[in-house]
Image (cartoon, grey):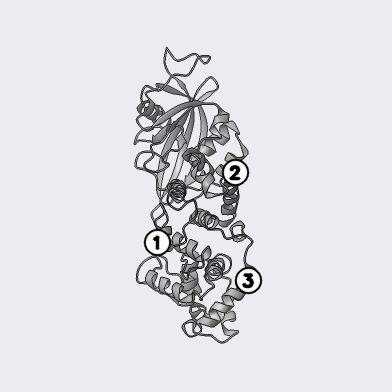
Amino acid sequence: MPEQAAASTHLPPQNHLGDLQNALLDWFAANQRRLPWRVNYTPYEVWISEVMLQQTQMERGVSYFNRWMQRFPDIATLAAASEEDVLRQWEGLGYYSRARHILTAARKIMAEHGGVFPSELEAIRGLPGVGPYTAGAVASIAFGEKLPCVDANVERVIARIFDVDSPVKQNPAAGIIHRWALRLVPDGRSREHNQAMMELGALVCGKKPRCAECPLARFCISLHLGITDQRPVPGKRATITPVNAVTGVLRCGNRIFVQKRPPAGVWGNLWEFPGGRVEPDESPEQATVREFMEETGFAVRVAAQHGIIRHGYTTYRLTLHCFGLEFDSADAPDSQITPPQPPLLSAATEARWVTPQDLDALAMPAAHRKLADKLFAIGKDSAVAANTAAPRQANLPLKKP
C-alpha cells in the first residue's frame, strides 16, 4: 500500500462528505491560480473562458482570453463584430463552430435579453452552442446555482475518490460520476467548489497523481486500495488516421491567391490555399496541380517546394506537402496587371488575390497559418496563433485536409 495512504486513517468519502467539502475548499482558498476571469466573475467572462478551455490548455487559454477581451470587452461589442473578425481572434483554438456559436449567441442576447446575459439555466441552455456542461458552469460559477461542473479533471477526481471501476465516458460510470458531482456541491459555495474540483484535477490529481499533496487523500478509496494508476478506467482509444495532403501557394506579382471555404463543415468560412488529398499512385506535385485545376480552373505548375507541415487532430494526423505555384499557360497574366479571377470555384464560396500583409487579417486553419507565417513572416498575433495551434481540432472532411 502506498506510504501516504498508510500515514492517516482512511475515511470512506460517502460517510464524510462535509469533511471532504471543507478540505477541498480550504485547499482551493490557499492554492487557486490567479486567472483573469476570476477577478469579477462576470457571466460573459465565465462563458468565454469555459468555451475556450474545453479543448485548450490553461496557459494558452489565458493568452487567448486576454486577447479576446481586448477586442471584445463586452457582449455588445462582440455582437456587432463580423464573423471574419471573430474567427480571426479564435484562430488556432480549433473547433471553429464554437466561435460562430458564440457570435450567434451574443446577437441573441442583444436581441432577446436586452444585452444582459441570462441568469436562468433554461435561458442559458437556449443560447446557441451552449450544452449542459457550459450552462452548468456559467450558472454555478457566475450565478451561484447549485449545479455540478463535470469536465475531464472532475471525472478523474471522482473516479479515484469513489473508485468508479468502468469507463468514465460511458454509463453506468458517467451517471455515477454526475450523481456524486451533484451531491458534493455544498449549499451556497458552488462557485468555489466547482472551480476547486477542476483545479484539483488539473494541478494535483492529474494523469500521474501527486497523492502526497492531495487534500482529499484520506478520503480516496483508490489511494486506500493502491490502485490510483488504474483510475479512471479509460474507454476505447480513437484510431488515428494518417492523411497525406497538399496545398499550393499561387502568386501573381505581389499577390497571393486564397479562397474561402463553405460555411458548413470543418474550417467553415476560413481562408485557405487550395489543395486536397493525394490520390493513390499520385505524387504530391501532381496532386497539387490537379487539385488547383479542379477547385479553381487555373492551370498551374510547381515552381517551388515549401516543405511539409504536420498537424494533429482528434482522429487524424495531417501531413501537408506545400508548394509554390505559377501559371502554366502561354497566356499567363503579366505580373504587372490585375490578377485574373478563377474560372470556377468548386470548393469555395469566395476567392481573393491578397498581399502578404492582408493574410494577417484573414482567419485561416492552423496548418495554413503556419505556412503563411513560414513564407511571409507576417504579424506577431498570427505567429502566436500558429505556433500554439491546438493539437486537437475538428475532424477532417473526406476530401479536403
Give the CA distance from mark 2 to mark 1.
37 Å
In the rendered image, the vertical position of residue 138 relative to residue 361, given as above or below: below
Q: Is residue 263 visible?
A: yes
Amino acid type at mark 3: Ala
In the rendered image, the vertical position of residue 285 relative to residue 28, given as above or below: above
Q: Which mark is residue 384?
A: 2
Would you name the residue on which mark 1 appears? Answer: 122
* x, y percent for residue 30: 65, 71
Quarter occupied by the N terminus: bottom right
Amino acid type at mark 2: Val
Foreground residue among 141 and 295: 141
Disc 1 residue crowd, few under 14, some 14–19, many 20+, Cα 10 Å: few
Mark 3 falls on what kind of element?
A: helix
Residue 374 quadrant: top right
Disc 2 residue crowd, few under 14, some 14–19, many 20+, Cα 10 Å: some
| 228 sits left or right of 239 in the view | right
Amino acid type at mark 1: Glu
| 316 sits left or right of 195 in the view | left
Mark 2 falls on what kind of element?
A: helix
Q: Residue at x 56, y 32 (%)?
A: 375
In the rendered image, the vertical position of residue 54 relative to residue 323, given as above or below: below
Q: Is residue 366 visible?
A: no
Quarter occupied by the C terminus: top left
All told, the count of numbered labels is 3
First in sequence, mark 2 or 1: give its number.
Answer: 1
First in sequence, mark 3 or 1: give its number.
Answer: 3
* x, y percent for residue 38: 60, 61
Q: Which mark is residue 204?
A: none
Give the CA distance from mark 3 to mark 1.
31 Å
Please identify the residue farthest to the bottom as the structure is shown.
Answer: 9
Q: Which mark is residue 29?
A: 3
